[in-house]
Image (cartoon, rainbow, N blue to C red):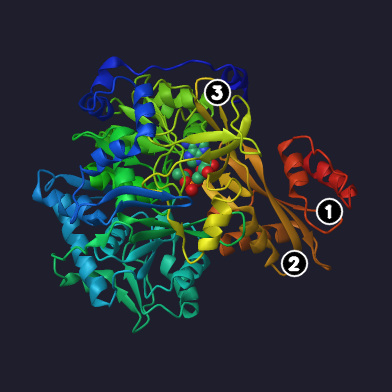
Amino acid sequence: MSRDLDTLLKEKRIFKPSKILTDETNIKKWMETQDVHDYDELLERASENPEWFWNDLARELEWFKPYRKTFEWNPPHAKWFLEGKFNIIHNALDRHIKGPNREKIAYLWEGESGEVRSLTYIELYKEVNKFANVLRGFGVEKGDTVSIYLPMILELPIAMLACAKIGAIHSVVFSGFWAKAFKDRINDSGSKIAITADGFTRRGKIINLKENVDKIMDKTPSIEKLIVINHADLPVEMHSPTDVWWHEIMENSDTECKTEEMDSEDPLFILYTSGTTGKPKGVVHVHAGYAVGVYTTMKFVFDIQEEDVWWCAADIGWITGHSYIVYAPLLIGATSLIYEGTPDFPDPGRIWGMVEKYGVSVFYTAPTTVRMFMKFGEKWPEKYDLSSLRLLGSVGEPINPEAWIWYYNTIGKGKCPIMDTWWQTETGMHLITPLPISKLKPGSAVKPFPTVIADVVDDDGKSVVGGGGHLVIKSTWPSMFRTLYKDPDRYVEAYWSTFKNIYLSGDVARKDEDGYFWIQGREDDVLNVAGHRISTAEVESALVSHPGVAEAAVVGKPDEIKGEEICAFIVLKENYKLEENLKEALINHVRMEIGPIATPACVNWVSDLPKTRSGKIMRRVIKAKVKGYPVGDISTLANPEVVDEIDKLID
Ligand code: 6R9
């Protein structure tokens, strides 16, 4: 891959979408109704008059009671669609079954071993109602939280949608995390109900979810019921009276259920994400603003049309799945594909075969997946007919121009524009992204979505053009997170205090002379491993919880495919030696504490960590060494000799 480094650095091509494509897009048609002539005019008018833009889109959804005011922005707090009565489920399901989408397929599902399932809108509506009635029967009320820990099976969106239907707040935990994460999140949110499955297969290997959950259940005092889905037919132990089978409680449940009328600003879900400390942040999203935001981006960025087959190949346990597998596709009435397994299993043709089989027309994945398939070679996608594709998307990390070009040529056959969408758990929807009418520069996320004001600033908050700086957002947007669960001070402190009342994204970016944004990555102690956010502090605390480890520092090591890998430096307690078996034990220990996504790629033993005279670990020294940057000023370092030690380890 590196032989192409020169080409990518010189990559200055601009890709213009074809006129036929742009003329037929949702955005172009909408602009015509509003007398907007081009992309620049759209962005200008929208940022001058966000009410105009959002009111027109909000009108496409149904309200139990119309809102009185589009938004109120008292930074850092925003309210949207004030005094409106709304429920995202009324718009994602209820209204479709009264119209032409009733018999349309909402979800196509394929399991890793090839089994298939599908649900039409009316079938999904009934399943959601049945489960909503079950939850009500267990005493779940508006405002209660429900904790969900499921693989990529249809019961996951069903459970989430059922919560939203009755006004409960779902908190989904990625099934690739170890059950300890589930325990912490249950206890943080005080859920009475937890939902899991017996297990699932990953690369043909069985993952026993229920067995793991059993190990934490006695440490979750709030749980009254554990609902278990029989997905993989694994032998499980059911504990009375807490554990109940999903299929048994669903059997006689009513297929009609009244949708709760919510206030626009009522919470919809909590999703935990990594921050700079070891304690994950519970990001809170609300019903109406979130719905309008994700619906609009689905319509204008991914340009979903009646006949499209949409595939967002993310996990529902992350925000990308919440927004663009569960809510946005249903709000717009699309047919989506959900795949349970690994993209290259049993061979690297798997996902391309699925594109052909289901006629996928819009496909959304992460750069790490694109780079992995580049490595497998063109022979795999070439085996399949990918001509159904018309638009591609990228998310989760910066896409290097070389991967962009490969995705564009080999997968999109030079005819599918790539929507490189920059956004975060906190933003809920795309904030910096091309539209299908934008000119594209490979590697750039292009410009802010209409109405969004983004900038790149220096440490004093002054705009920088050309050079790198902090990526900030200076406006509000409808699907903005409203707070951090039970931690309103951290909401202000972590995001809105560095530059008063301006949203600090935690990313470094560059804005070029055309106003195009080039996202460079995180600037804080959050790693991005294969598109997953992992805090170095979480991995460090997992390491030091091992009896042999005295101290640990974790940094990201650049990796061609995953973007970054976890690289740990540890100081051992007396009587411990870093032999192969201890190294393995430590790696396993982190996997068990957090989950397989946090598996360290390397564990290095050092006699001490670089520290200031006051005893603070100077991570930036290790970071610079691992990334091959100059270490800079180390005059405050109390133990400069360890820098040589680290040097030797890296060579
Ligand atoms: C949606 C999602 C957010 C972080 C974000 C940034 C990185 C996401 C990106 C991107 C460059 C893109 N990121 N999209 N970097 N280009 N198109 O991934 O949310 O899991 O919260 O991660 O991901 O670093 O700050 P989340």
Residue 506 appears left or right of 577:
left
Disc 1 and disc 3 in contact, CB within 8 angstroms: no
What residue is shown at x 47% (from left), y 24% (from top)?
406
Residue 431 appears left or right of 563:
left
Residue 636 appears left or right of 409:
right
Q: Is mark 1 within 8 Å of ligand 1?
A: no
Mark 1 is surrounded, within 10 Å at the Cα level, by few (under 14), some (14 to 19) or many (20 or more) other residues, namely some
Three-letter code for the amino acid on which mark 3 is drawn: Asp
Please identify, in this view, whether the residue under mark 1 or under mark 3 is nearer the observer.
3
Alpha-carbon span between mark 3 and mark 2: 49 Å
Q: Secondary structure at mark 3?
A: loop
**Residue 114 is at least partly visible in this image:** no
Mark 1 or mark 2, which has the lower sequence index? 2
Please identify, in this view, whether the residue under mark 3 or under mark 2 is nearer the observer.
3
What residue is shown at x 20% (from left), y 42% (from top)?
60
Split into 4 quadrants, where in the image is the N terminus? top right
Three-letter code for the amino acid on which mark 2 is drawn: Gly
Residue position for label 1: 612
Disc 1 and disc 2 in contact, CB within 8 angstroms: no
Residue position for label 3: 512
Alpha-carbon span between mark 1 and mark 3: 37 Å
Mark 1 or mark 3, which has the lower sequence index? 3
Q: Residue 611 placed where, x, y %?
A: 82, 54
Front one among 538 and 245: 538
Split into 4 quadrants, where in the image is the C terminus? top right
Give the quadrant of residue 263. Answer: bottom left
What residue is shown at x 16% (from left), y 66% (from top)?
257
Name above or below for residue 600 compared with residue 624.
Answer: below
Name above or below for residue 330 compared with residue 367.
Answer: below
Alpha-carbon span between mark 1 and mark 2: 24 Å
What residue is shown at x 30% (from left), y 28% (from top)?
389
Q: Residue furthest bottom?
A: 241
